[in-house]
Amino acid sequence: MDLNQYAAVYKDNLLKDVIPFWEKFSPDQQYGGYFTCLDRQGKVFDTDKFIWLQARQVWTFSMLYNKVEARTSWLDFAVMGASFLEQYGRDEKGDWFFSLTREGKPLVQPYNIFSDCFAAMAFGQLYKATGEKRYKNIAVHTFDRILQRYNEPKGKYNKTVPGTRPLKGLSLPMILSNLVLDIEHVLSGEQVRNTIDNCVKTVMEEFFHPSTGLVLENVIPGGRMSDSFEGRAVIPGHSLESMWFLMDIAARNEDADLLSKTVGIALNLLNFGWDQEYGGIFYVLDIKGHPPQHLEWDQKLWWVHLEAIVAMLKGYRYTGDKRCMEWFKILHDYAWSRFPDPDYGEWYGYLNRRGETLLPLKGGKWKGCFHVPRCLFQGWKTLEEIIAPENDLQQTTSSHG
């Protein structure tokens, strides 16, 4: 396939397959919000509602409305989810619960700050789509609370004993580096600059492990490695996702040095995480080669491969490094031959190490309407950006011929 054909594959799968699947099967017409626990055919197998998946779906449809086409049906679908979140999603402090019953009764306390991160993204995009001030206020208040909770994100729900083995995780600075750009339109310039600077510094100076060229999932504050299960863990998918977020920041700030480093790290992560025997990217590995504590360490997950695809496309788009394009084609061939379901639509989420379908679900507690559509959109648009200069060059060449 040439790049135009790849772009068409990503666009068509997004708009003709994945998005229609969620439009058809996920709305809860009785209580509002969305069902996310959907089997292969789209039937609901559990009705609990997870805040971060509800918010991610609001974001997805708001983003499509803002960036693809102003379809009223997409906006109405986003507002449907947002109304449910507004009514039931927060505690008295404005922090977002982890999960609710179908009717909206709180099930799990707001221990997980990523509920808040995706709520801020959702309401920030919805404000851009509607101009409704209350959506902006929710996004800003939620972002402020995230910054207040940054150093102790779990607060009173933290089960570890303080002081014995202090660890900080990659996930929060990673998410913030993307969130801050996504809702830049509702934040002050100073907030944006400070958050970007802090995220870049934290990821590159604390989590990046120079002697291996890899990124650790957990470190002792300040950046020292903890020789423990948690401290030795590398999650290639997380780190690759983090790298494409930082590539976007580097391109935005015209920071060639950061761009070069992030592309190099992304390539390192793929070389480290790729399963040489069966293909695909391992979910979790130990940086020293010890057995990981995660029993699912060798599974091949949908989002890991999608984030890797986006990282390679952006790496090529920003630097022209041919290794990125070579990896993109390898990743594309692996993912597209295994994850999409040609019979019932959408993508499987979980494969075993050999690349066989492990669970037939299309959505659950962790998989919703987010990684697949976001990465299909990013893939489609990044491919178009790569193609455009090539077309310009061909036209220039032919006009001078």
Image (cartoon, rainbow, N blue to C red):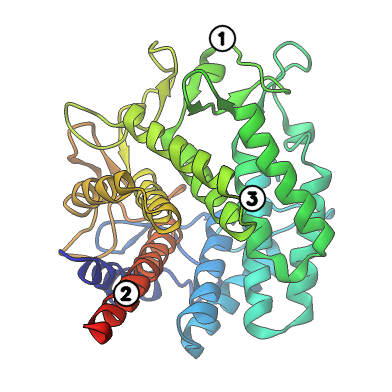
Q: Quadrant of residue 44?
A: bottom left
Q: Can residue 107 be seen in this view?
A: no
Instruction: Tell which tag, 3 or 2, sits nearer the viewer.
Output: 2
Left/right of residue 153 with respect to residue 327 in the rendered view:
right
Question: Which label is found at residue 393?
Answer: 2
Instruction: Tell which tag, 2 or 1, sits nearer the viewer.
Output: 2
Question: Which label is found at residue 227?
Answer: 1
| Residue 26 in picture, x, y percent from top left | 42, 68
**What's under tag 2, amino acid-wise?**
Leu
Question: Looking at the image, which residue is at 78% across and 76% down?
Answer: 134
Q: Is residue 387 visible?
A: yes
The residue that mark 3 highlights is 177
Q: In which quarter of the image is residue 343?
A: bottom left
Instruction: Tell which tag, 3 or 1, sits nearer the viewer.
Output: 3
Left/right of residue 313 with respect to residue 145 in the rendered view:
left
Q: Earlier in the sequence, mark 3 or mark 1?
A: 3
Secondary structure beneath label 1: loop
Q: Earlier in the sequence, mark 3 or mark 2?
A: 3
Left/right of residue 63 with respect to residue 41 in the rendered view:
right
Q: Disc 2 to disc 1, how far (Cα)? A: 52 Å
Quadrant where the N terminus is found in the figure: bottom left
Q: Residues within 10 Å of mark 2 (few under 14, many from 20)?
A: few
Quadrant where the C terminus is found in the figure: bottom left
Question: Looking at the image, which residue is at 82% across and 64% down?
Answer: 188
Question: Looking at the image, which residue is at 46% across and 35% down?
Answer: 265
Q: How crowded is mark 3: few (under 14 residues within 10 Å), some or many (20 or more)?
A: many
Q: Disc 3 to disc 1, how far (Cα)? A: 27 Å
| Closer to us: 20 or 203 | 203
Question: Looking at the image, which residue is at 17% across and 33% down?
Answer: 354
Left/right of residue 45 with respect to residue 169 in the rendered view:
left
| Residue 298 in picture, x, y percent from top left | 31, 28
